[in-house]
Structure formats: structure tokens, C-alpha cells
Image (cartoon, rainbow, N blue to C red):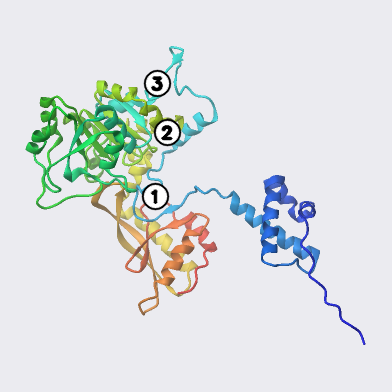
Amino acid sequence: MSTRLRTEPSPLPSVDRLLREPALESLLGAYGRVRLTAAIRTHLAALRDAGIAAAATDAARVESIAAAVGARLVEDARPSLRPVANLTGTVLHTNLGRALLPQAAIDAIARVALQPCNLEFDVAAGKRGERDAHVETRLCDLAGAEAALVVNNNAAAVLLVLNSLARNREVIVSRGELVEIGGHFRIPDIMARAGARLREVGTTNRTHLADYADALTPKSAIVMKVHASNYEVRGFASTVSERELAALARERGVPLVTDLGSGTLVDLRQWGLPHEPTVRETIEAGADLVMFSGDKLLGGPQCGIVAGRAALVDKLRRNPLKRALRVDKIVLAALEQVLMLYGDLERLPAELPTLRLLTRTRDEIEPVARDLARGFAAALDVGYEVDVVDCASQIGSGALPVDTLPSVGVRIASSAARPGRDGAVQRLQRALRELPMPVIGRLVDHALILDCRCLLDAAPLIAQLGALRPPGA
């Protein structure tokens, strides 16, 4: 009578042994010994924690470990910040990076990033220079201002202005302009951090010139007007224009500062877009300082710009906060190139991505949407319905909040007739986010809408649909 002995599973191979295995040789060359060793240790520890023993043969277990470690290294090497396909219908999407930079700006970034540059060096004089000088002249020419400076965003511009001109004094603002600019950042909160005291005038829907006049006292430092760029009050409403307010402020000896938020340097009506107050119009109306963003309608890198009277801008420059809020050579290089594009308005829509996307017509967008719809129809199973539909895009980032742009998109819905089957669409939405280039759309009435305004060519997106394996509806 023979006795069958039970064999225990083979132990997992050691780290040293795996590093010598040919199956991991390519990983060693691609990622280096330190990273590969760490990945192997992490994977072996996970196998031990799960109680998983080695495979029956050496070759099988080494191949399995090599595949798993390779996948881990690929995932770890993938940048956290990476491109996505913006099919939300919002051109200047804050969560998706706002303005796209023109090629000239990208080339300029590469030049100053790869070698030393004259960021704060006056080459002609051979001494220290001012970093804002690289863009100030162009900003002043475009805005009709005496002086200008740049900080890291528009909230910083507002903070710097308030702290420089109104610390421990009153700032007079209409109640209807005490906006929240996103991410729970509110104008009153910024004022408090700047050390200024808020003096509200008027009501939410109506503020009159007399309200400002009555509020002005020796404690008043500035009058501030905030452009309602991310909302609109309609109906029984009234506001005071910059021109009226500027006359009152000059009479009382206080500056008028205007926060334009998503400011623009050109009149958008020449390209069939709704009117948004320009920086030049605001200064010509009497504003002493204007604050606005560089990465919204201007179409440049993230920054905040202050333009206006030289004496006031000089006060801002002398504030120690200016150094804390300053921008680097990358931003200035990109901004300079974007401002140069504004010297040729005929070519601006073709050269500036933001304006190009905003001015695309429905007829230009529709062929791209039809190509994309065909791609999805071929990639998805019969559980989905794919249609080309008209939709409405918006500018975004607080610009022209109630104005929309006619667009065309792809509508994908579950073909299930009974309600409560939105799960299929939501699973598809999640699967699209897991593609090599994540695709971001929006849900509308239980369907996924992929607005094609920001998609110039559907082919690259369609090419990656082969990796799409959504569950059936």
C-alpha cells in the first residue's frame, strides 16, 4: 500500500533572483534598478498578504510576476497631470485647465526653460531689471494704461490692490457685486485677508450713485466695482456705470478700481460673439486700476494682471506681497507671445486657440460630430443609441454666463426602454474617463452629451475607442 505525500506550493522567488531573470531584463533597462526593485518588493508583499503561492513552474511564475510588475511600473510612470478630451461644451473649463496656449507661447516656454534668460536682468544697462518689463509695454498699449504688472492669478491681483491701497480702511462695493468667484472664494473674504474693511451699499438688485455718495467718508480708501461675470441679475435691477462712478470718485479724491474677472483686450463683437467689457473701455470710462485674468478670454497662461495709473501701480510694486505673488519666467514667456498675437487682429482667431474655439460655427463642428458618432456606433454594443444632436456650448470661467454658442455633439443613451437604466450610461461615462486620453462629457436627461466644439479632429479620439470595453446596457 503506497502513501501519497501532499506537496506544498513552491515559495515565491527572491527579489535578487527576479532581478537576474531575462523576463525582467527589459524592465531593468527601462526603469532602473531602484524603481524595479521597489516594484518587485511591493508585488511580492501583496502576493504574500493575499496568501498566493508561486505557480507550478518557474517559467510561469516568473512570467506572471514580470507582467504584474511591468504593469505597476507603467501605471506609476503615468503623469498625474495629463491631457484630456474636453467635450463638456465649456470652452474655458476651470477644472480642465482653461485656455489652451498657442504654439508660439509653447515654443517660448521651451526656450526659457532650457537655458538661462534675462528674467530680471537689463541686458542693455548691464544691471538688475524688472521682470514685469517683458510684458508691461505691450499690456499698456493694448489696454490704454500708463502701467501694468502681473501676479499669479486674478484673485491675487485683487488681494494686492486691496492690501496696497485700502489696508485698515474702507472699500465701498455694491451688495449686488459681492460675488463668489469659484472654489468658495468670495470677494468679502479676499477683502478681509487683505486687511480692508468692506462697506456695502445698495441692494442685491439695485444700487444707485447716491448710495456710493452717501457712503464716502474720510475712512474710504477706494471705490470698487466688480464685474458680474459669472451671473446676471435681470428684471427690476440697476447698477452704476464706471463713468458715473469714476466722476464721483475723482470728486471725492479716491481711486476707482474695477475687477473685470475674465477680462478681454478686444471687442469680441467683431467675431460675432456677445460683448464683454474690454480693459481699454473700462480705463477710458475712468477706472484708475483694472484687474483681470490672463488665462480666460485673453487666452494666455494663468496669471492676474493689474493695469491703470502709474502712481497706483507703483504702490503695488512696492508692496512686499508683490514678491510673494509674482509669476515666473514660464508665465511671462507665454504671456508675451500671446500679447504679440493681439497686434494682428485679422489673424488672431486663427492663431489664438481660445478665440478659434469660440468662433467655430455650427457648420464647422457638425462634420466632426458625425465622424465621432460613427466611431462610437462601431465601438459600442447594441445596448446604446448614438445620435448627432444640436447643443449649446458656453464660454466658461465666469465669462458671459447667460450667453451660449450653437454647437453640435454626440448623444449616447441606453437603448433600454424602461426607466432606471441610467447605470449603462454612467458606466460608459466612467469607461471613457479610463481611456489613454480621458474623454470628459456631460450628462443631460439620462444621456451622455459629447459637445464637439473643442474637438478639431475626431480621428485621434476614435482611434482609442478600441480600448473601450463598456458593459452592455
- How far across and how far down the image is residue 350, in percent? 36, 41
Quadrant of the frame with the C terminus: bottom left
For the residues bearing labels 2 and 3, Cβ distance under 8 angstroms: no
- How far across and how far down the image is residue 395, in percent? 30, 49
Quarter-wise, where is residue 163 in the image? top left
Depth check, front residue: 192 or 43: 192
- How far across and how far down the image is residue 38, in percent? 68, 50
Q: Which secondary structure lies at badge 2?
A: helix
**Number of marks in the rendered image:** 3
CA gap between label 1 and label 2 equals 19 Å
Q: Residue at x 31, y 41 (%)?
A: 297
Count residues near mark 1 (Cα–Cα under 10 Å), then give few for <14, some for 14-19, many for 20+: few
**Quick check: can you spot residue 345?**
no
Residue at which label 2 appears: 331
Instruction: Locate residue 185 relative to residue 37 in the image: left or right.
Output: left
Nearer the viewer's eye, disc 2 or disc 3? 3
Quadrant of the frame with the N terminus: bottom right
CA gap between label 2 and label 3 equals 15 Å
Q: Residue at x 42, y 18 (%)?
A: 129
Residue at which label 1 appears: 95
Count residues near mark 2 (Cα–Cα under 10 Å), then give few for <14, some for 14-19, many for 20+: many
CA gap between label 1 and label 3 equals 32 Å
Depth check, front residue: 68 or 51: 51
Q: Label 1 amino acid?
A: Asn
Q: Label 3 amino acid?
A: Glu
Residue at which label 3 appears: 130
Between discs 1 and 2, the one toward the N terminus: 1
Q: Residue at x 50, y 71 (%)?
A: 471
